[in-house]
Image: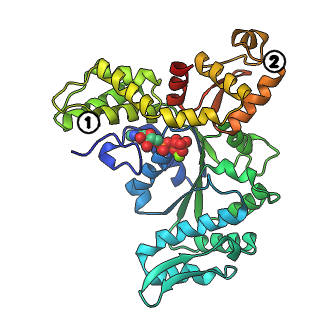
Amino acid sequence: MENPFYITGIIPEPYFCDRKKETTWMVRTLENKAHILLTSPRRMGKTQLVRHVFEQPSIKDNYYTFYTDIYSTTSLHELVLFLSKEIYSVLVPKGKAAIDKFLAGLHSVKGSFGYDPINSTPTFDIKLGDIHSPELTLDEIFHYLEQADKPCIFAIDEFQQIIKYPEKNVEAILRTHIQKLNNCLFIYAGSNRHILENMFSSTAKPFYNSAEQIYLDCIHKDIYIGFAQEQFTKANRKITPEAASFAYDLFEGHTYYVHNVLHNAFAYLDADKVVDTEDIQKTLIDILDEKDHTFASVMNQLNYQQKETLIAIAKEGKASGVTSVAFVKKHALKSTSSVQYVINTLLDKQLLTYIDEGRTKVYSVADRFLEMWICRTY
Ligand SMILES: Nc1ncnc2c1ncn2[C@@H]1O[C@H](COP(=O)(O)OP(=O)(O)OP(=O)(O)O)[C@@H](O)[C@H]1O
Ligand SMILES: [Mg+2]
């Protein structure tokens, strides 16, 4: 029996939970020819939502859709490589003629990609060094999208990455290109809300006001519990509503974590056992045990001050006023002046995350399993 709680890869439609409102909004916004900025905390479901939107008939039938995650890129060269690679992979199933058309427009790239004449199989072998003038290649890529026989939607995930590129004015360069396009819409997604909203909401920035914004929150509790029970029932199994509710509350509905616990409960408990709250508790303990080694090595890579700050925030759950004397005293930290610096480092390492509440920032550990593990361990 297939596990209905997917925790990796693309979720097939019957196992995709809710997001009805968001999907409708995104489809409508795209149909109105507006670009979209999609943000959320990590692991809330952005990537899955984008894929789900692409599967909607009105999108699937009328647009070419592309998706690339640029989290690992650190230069405009790489961005260009990722964009072309994605276009290429979408074209592969369409055959040689489609690929040839794309390649014919890429004058600036010297690498070998196209069709292997001997095996008649597609090959993609561009190296970073083959992209000599990324701006020019970018131009060629966008030109290609512009003359495609259907409108295109390009989702660029972890878009905030572009501000870390060493090249100057990447934001301005991209924006200038995108502004000229009539045939291609963009979905910019990412979890670094602070950076992204700043890119799109400050008047001085090139992307200012250039996309409709949507913030993805948790799936509503009743809907999620209904979904969980339905999945168990479909497999001739049972979970009590209390157990599903308990799993949801453990992580305040944070999608990936709730889903992960139910995935494991489904996978490792006897099929004839009605899953109850105690089973969920045990499942969670097993997950944390399993992560013991990984989390220990995360801690191992931190210096003493980073460690004590991370522990303090984990114990606090949601920590506000972190630079106050009270917070520093309560957790016996070194000094108020160094806390902010340490927190910034931990944010950079993506170990912490925060939300703005009025004028204060409320910090928490980004990985909820790590947070629980720290509370248990220290
Ligand atoms: N609508 C959904 N239905 C079922 N499971 C979901 C849904 N949305 C998210 N999930 C679960 O949460 C996991 C994380 O989702 P996803 O990768 O889309 O999050 P993300 O916000 O893109 O995360 P990241 O910030 O790490 O890129 C999925 O692998 C899946 O287990
Ligand atoms: Mg993602």
Q: Residue at x 64, y 27 (%)?
A: 355
Color scheme of the displayed model: rainbow
Q: Residue at x 74, y 50 (%)?
A: 163
Three-letter amino acid code of the residue under disc 1: Gln
Q: Position of residue 367 (x, y in %)?
A: 54, 32
Q: Residue at x 83, y 58 (%)?
A: 168
Task: Using the rendered view, name the quadrant where residue 345 is placed.
Answer: top right
Quadrant that contains the N terminus: top left
Task: Using the rendered view, name the quadrant where residue 143 is placed.
Answer: bottom right
Q: Position of residue 20 (x, y in %)?
A: 41, 39
Please determine whether, in this image, residue 61 is positioned above or below residue 97: above
For mark 1, does the 10 Å Cα neighbourhood hold few (<14), some (14 to 19), or many (20 or more) residues?
many
* Residue 346 disc label: none
Mark 1 sits on what residue?
A: 231
Three-letter amino acid code of the residue under disc 2: Ser
Please determine whether, in this image, residue 56 is positioned above or below residue 76: above
Q: Is residue 156 visible?
A: yes
Helix, strand or loop under label 2: loop
> Disc 2 and disc 1: Cα gap in Å?
50 Å
* Residue 335 disc label: 2
Q: Is residue 362 visible?
A: no
Please determine whether, in this image, residue 235 is positioned above or below residue 109: above
